[in-house]
Image (tube, rainbow, N blue to C red):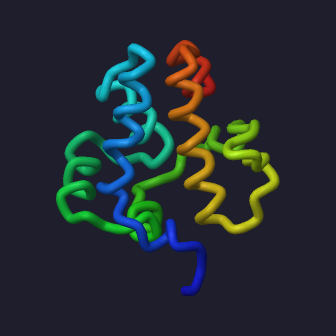
Amino acid sequence: MSGHRIFSTPFAAVYPMYVAKAKRKGRTQEEVDRVICWLTGYDQAGLLHQLTLKVDFEAFFAQAPEMHPNSNLIKGVVCGIRVEDVEDPLMKRIRQLDKLVDELAKGKSMEKVLRQ
């Protein structure tokens, strides 16, 4: 599959950036993990396994146990792009994850971030 270069980027290379962004704003790695697991259906062990394997974003989302049914409620703008308007399914998932981490870093409550 040809596509954006982020598709072949190892998830483990970007994960520390998600954590660092959240920590700069007073959030924790555990909260970042909870957001990732909520979106993808991975449990903590599954997430750590994917990080250890250094799978790329394409494989990370392809192997996700189950995308959360409320993921379609993730709306807004990330890097100038409206998440709900992204047509490529993989890019949409990546943008949804980016949006969740952004919301976490902006101080939203976990209930709001997780669309509960």
Residue displayed at 37% across by 68% down: 56
Quarter that holds the C terminus: top right
Is 6 situated left or right of 59 in this image?
right
Comparing 70 with 33, the one in front is 33
Quarter that holds the N terminus: bottom right
Is 39 situated left or right of 56 in this image?
right
Residue displayed at 32% across by 56% down: 13
Residue 112 is drawn in which quadrant?
Answer: top right
Residue displayed at 43% across by 73% down: 8
With respect to residue 107, does 114 lie above or below? below
Residue displayed at 35% across by 64% down: 10
Is 33 situated left or right of 96 in this image?
left
Residue 97 screen position, x and y as percent:
54, 44
Residue 46 screen position, x and y as percent:
25, 50
Is 44 situated left or right of 21 in this image?
left
Comparing 52 with 66, the one in front is 52
With respect to residue 76, does 30 lie above or below? above
| Tally of marks | 0
Residue 52 screen position, x and y as percent:
18, 58
Comparing 78 with 112, the one in front is 78
With respect to residue 30, does 15 lie above or below? below
Comparing 70 with 112, the one in front is 112
Residue 26 screen position, x and y as percent:
39, 14
